Amino acid sequence: MNSPPWLRAAGDDVVLALHVQPGAKKTEVAGQHGDALKVRLGAPPVDGKANDCLIAFLAERLGVPKARVLLEAGSTSRQKRVRIVGVETKAAVAALAQ
């Protein structure tokens, strides 16, 4: 299966390349942004609120506990790399692609 450029398999996990837009009206996937998946976040980029919102959103969307969503890079950037532990590539694409 051909994966989108924003997703790569890493053993039993998937790693997502994300471009986030904090402070949006609602939290949602907004399609592809270059080689990243764009996610709008309803939380402001203050005191880690946007990161917490992103982790909660991805966990809910993928049906995994928040503890299995790990922010690997970009904690203070719009460009983020997130690892989802124990999720198959196919399931991640189905849950996130529009």
Image: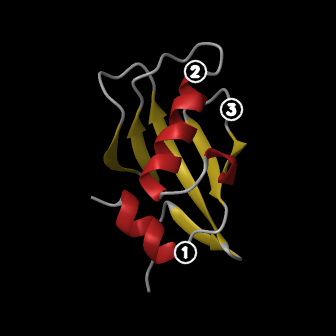
**The C terminus is located in which quarter?**
bottom left
Task: Give the SS element for disc 1.
Answer: loop
Q: Are marks 3 and 2 in contact (CB under 8 Å)?
A: no
Residue 2, by quadrant, is: bottom left
The residue wearing badge 2 is 49
- The answer to whether any part of residue 35 appears in the image is no
- From mark 3 to mark 1, how far is it between C-alphas? 24 Å
Locate residue 4, reporting x and y percent: 43, 68
From the viewer's perspective, is 70 left or right of 44?
A: right
- From mark 3 to mark 2, how far is it between C-alphas? 11 Å
Of circles 3 and 1, which is in front? Answer: 1
Q: In percent of the image, x 34 and y 61: which residue is there?
A: 97
The residue wearing badge 3 is 75
The residue wearing badge 1 is 88
Q: Residues within 10 Å of mark 1 (few under 14, many from 20)?
A: some
Q: Residues within 10 Å of mark 3 (few under 14, many from 20)?
A: some
Q: Are marks 3 and 1 in contact (CB under 8 Å)?
A: no
Locate residue 73, reporting x and y percent: 71, 43
**In this picture, is 54 found above or below 44?**
below
From the viewer's perspective, is 39 left or right of 51?
A: left
Q: In percent of the image, x 52 and y 64: which residue is there?
A: 7
Q: Amino acid at mark 3?
A: Ser
Q: Amino acid at mark 2?
A: Lys
**In this picture, is 86 found above or below 6?**
below
**In this picture, is 30 found above or below 20?**
below
- The answer to whether any part of residue 45 appears in the image is yes
- Of mark 3 and mark 2, the one earlier in the sequence is 2
- Of mark 1 and mark 2, the one earlier in the sequence is 2
